C-alpha cells in the first residue's frame, strides 16, 4: 500500500525542521502512482501533484509524526479541496414549484435507481412532495421499473401512457406536478451503452422543454476513466449541476471522483452505496480522499498528533525511557494519551509496521482498549510510593489495590506484568523512541 511505500522512504529519516524538496519529491512520486492506481486521470494527477509540492516544501515538520505521514496529510487536504471541500451538496429548490430534477447518464449507470433513492430521501427527510416520471421509452419495461421502485419507496410516479415521446412525457409530468401541488418532479431519462448523437440531441431537447433547476449526471464509479470521458460529453450538451456517483460500495478506489469534479466543474452531490432503495449517501470529500489514498488512518493520526500530543511531555517521557526509568505514573500517562488518541489499537494500527508491536503488547498484558479504563483505575489506587517503585507491591498491597479499584488481584498482576514488560522494552529501545521502536519491530 501507499502507506508502506512511504514508510520505507522515510524510514530512518530523522528530518527535523522543514520538509526538504528531495524527500517531498520522493514521497510525491509514490502518491502519484497511488492516484493513477485509483483511476485519477493523468493530467489531473499531474496538476494535483504540482500543487501539493508547492505546499509541502518548507512546511514545518511535526515532531510526533514522520515526514512521510505529514506529506500524506498535505496530500489529503489538497485532495479534499479538489473534491469540492466545503462545496454545498444540497439540491437547489429555489424556483417556482415544482422544482425539476433531470437525471442523465449512460445506460446501466444507475439513473433509475438513483432517481428513486433521491426521491425517497427528499420525501422522507425534507418532507418534499415528489413525483417521478420515466422518459425511457426505449428500454423495454424501463417505465415499469421506475413504477415498481416508486411503490417500494412510496413515491408517486406518473401514470404510464404508451406511445408518448420522451418530450411529451416530460411535459405531462410538469403539468401533473403543477396541478398536483408537487414540490419536486424528477425526470429519469433513457441512456445508451455509449454516447451517440441521437441520445445527446434527445437529452438537450428534454432539458430545453423542462428547464430543470438540477441536472444530475449519474456515473458508475467502477467504470473509472470512462466515466470521466462520459462526463465531458454530457457536460458539452447540458449544464450539469451535480454528479451522482454510483457503486461506491464496490471496490472502485474512487479516483474518478477527483477527475469528475475537475471535468464537470460541478460538485458530486450523492454517492450510491448499494442496490437497496435507501443506499444513498451525501458526498463527503474527506471520506473519498481517504479512500483514494487508501490511508485515511494515517491522516487522522497526523491530525490527532498535531492536536493532542503534548510535545514537552513526550520529550520528557522519552528521556526517562532512555534511562530505563519507566514507572507506573509514566504508564498512566501513556494510557491517558492512548485514550485521547483513540485507544491502543487505534494508535498501533495507524502506524505502518506496528502490527507486531500490538501483538506483543497484547500478549504481555492484554492491553486492549476496554481494559485501559480498568488499568488506570488500578494505577490510581496505588500510593505514590507504589507508583514510583512497583517492586513494593506485595500480596496485601495488591489485595488493597484490587479492592480500591473494583478489580481483581489477577487484574492487578496483569498490569504489573505489562508494566514490567513495557519498561524492559522501553529500556532496550532506548533513544530510538517510537521511530526506533517501529524500525526494530517492523521486521
Ligand atoms: P440506469 O440504466 O442508469 O437507469 O441504471 P439502473 O438504475 O437501472 O441500475 C442498473 C443496475 O445497477 C441495477 O441493477 C441497480 O440495482 C444497480 N445499481 C444502481 N446503483 C447502485 C449502487 O450504488 N450500488 C450497487 N451495488 N448497485 C447499484
Ligand atoms: Mg433507467
Image: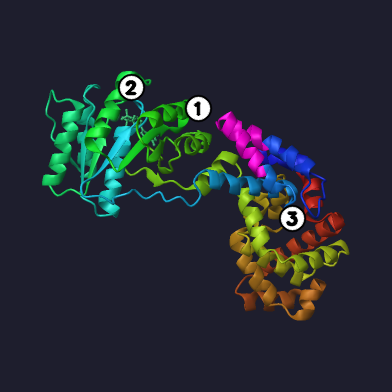
Instruction: Please tell me how crowded label 3 is: few (under 14), some (14-19), or many (20+) other residues with Cα within 10 Å.
Output: some
Provide the secondary structure element on which disc 2 rests: loop
User: Could one spot residue 345 in this view of the protein?
Assistant: no
Give the distance between the C-alpha atoms of the residues marked 3 and 2, in whole angstroms.
52 Å
Q: In this view, does 401 lie to the left or right of 40?
A: right
Rendering colour mode: rainbow
Residue that numbered label 1 is attached to = 225
| Mark toward the start of the polypeptide (2 vs 1) | 2
Q: Point out the stretch of residues depicted in magenta.
A: 31-52
**In contact (CB < 8 Å): disc 3 and disc 2:** no
Give the distance between the C-alpha atoms of the residues marked 3 and 1, in whole angstroms.
36 Å
Instruction: Please tell me how crowded label 1 is: few (under 14), some (14-19), or many (20+) other residues with Cα within 10 Å.
Output: some
What residue is shown at x 82% (from left), y 72% (from top)?
391
Residue that numbered label 3 is attached to = 60
Residue that numbered label 2 is attached to = 192
Q: Which of 412 and 77 is in front in this view?
A: 77
Q: In which quarter of the image is residue 32?
A: top right
In the rendered image, the vertical position of residue 338 relative to residue 269, given as above or below: below
| Mark toward the start of the polypeptide (3 vs 2) | 3
Ligand 2 shows up in the quarter that is top left
Residue 138 belongs to the span the image colors magenta:
no
Give the distance between the C-alpha atoms of the residues marked 2 and 1, in whole angstroms.
17 Å
Amino acid at each position: 500500500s501507499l502507506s508502506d511505500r512511504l514508510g520505507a522512504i522515510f524510514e530512518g529519516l530523522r528530518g527535523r525542521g522543514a520538509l526538504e524538496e528531495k524527500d517531498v519529491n520522493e514521497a510525491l512520486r509514490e502518491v502519484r502512482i497511488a492516484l493513477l492506481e485509483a483511476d485519477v486521470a493523468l493530467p489531473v494527477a499531474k496538476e494535483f501533484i504540482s500543487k501539493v509540492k508547492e505546499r509541502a516544501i518548507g512546511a514545518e515538520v511535526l515532531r510526533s509524526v514522520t515526514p512521510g505521514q505529514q506529506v500524506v496529510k498535505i496530500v489529503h487536504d489538497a485532495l479534499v479541496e479538489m473534491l469540492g471541500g466545503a462545496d454545498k451538496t444540497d439540491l437547489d429548490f429555489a424556483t417556482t414549484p415544482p422544482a425539476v430534477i433531470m437525471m442523465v447518464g449512460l445506460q446501466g449507470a444507475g439513473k433509475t435507481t438513483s432517481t428513486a433513492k433521491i426521491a425517497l430521501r427528499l420525501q422522507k427527510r425534507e418532507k418534499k412532495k415528489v413525483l417521478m416520471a420515466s422518459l425511457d421509452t426505449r428500454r423495454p419495461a424501463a417505465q415499469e421499473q421506475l413504477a415498481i421502485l416508486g411503490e417500494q419507496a412510496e413515491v408517486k410516479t406518473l401514470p404510464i401512457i404508451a406511445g408518448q415521446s420522451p418530450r411529451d412525457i416530460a411535459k405531462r409530468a410538469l403539468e401533473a406536478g403543477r396541478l398536483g401541488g408537487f414540490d419536486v418532479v424528477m425526470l429519469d431519462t433513457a441512456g445508451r451503452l455509449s454516447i451517440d448523437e441521437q441520445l445527446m440531441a434527445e437529452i438537450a431537447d428534454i432539458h430545453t422543454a423542462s428547464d430543470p433547476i438540477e441536472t444530475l449526471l449519474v456515473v458508475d464509479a467502477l467504470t473509472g476513466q470512462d466515466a470521466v470521458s462520459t462526463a465531458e460529453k454530457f457536460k458539452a450538451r447540458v449544464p450539469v449541476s451535480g454528479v451522482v456517483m454510483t457503486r461506491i460500495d464496490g471496490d472502485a478506489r474512487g479516483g474518478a471522483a477527483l477527475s469528475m469534479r475537475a471535468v464537470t466543474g460541478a460538485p458530486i452531490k450523492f454517492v450510491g452505496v448499494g442496490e437497496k432503495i435507501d443506499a444513498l449517501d451525501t458526498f463527503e470529500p474527506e471520506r473519498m480522499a481517504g479512500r483514494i489514498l487508501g490511508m485515511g488512518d494515517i491522516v487522522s493520526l497526523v491530525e490527532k498528533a498535531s492536536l493532542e500530543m503534548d510535545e514537552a511531555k513526550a520529550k520528557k517521557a522519552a528521556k526517562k525511557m532512555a534511562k530505563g526509568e519507566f514507572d507506573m505514573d509514566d504508564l498512566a500517562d501513556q494510557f491517558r494519551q492512548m485514550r485521547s488518541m483513540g485507544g491502543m489499537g487505534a494508535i498501533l494500527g495507524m502506524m505502518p509496521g506496528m502490527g507486531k508491536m500490538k501483538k506483543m503488547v497484547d500478549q504481555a498484558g492484554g492491553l486492549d482498549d476496554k481494559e485501559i479504563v480498568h488499568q488506570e483505575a488500578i494505577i490510581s489506587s496505588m500510593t505514590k510510593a507504589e507508583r514510583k517503585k512497583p517492586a513494593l507491591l506485595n500480596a496485601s498491597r495488591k489485595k488493597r489495590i484490587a479492592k480500591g479499584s473494583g478489580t481483581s488481584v489477577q487484574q492487578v498482576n496483569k498490569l504489573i506484568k505489562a508494566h514490567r514488560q513495557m519498561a524492559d522494552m522501553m529500556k532496550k529501545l532506548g533513544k530510538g523512541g517510537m521511530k526506533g521502536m517501529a524500525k526494530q519491530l517492523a521486521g
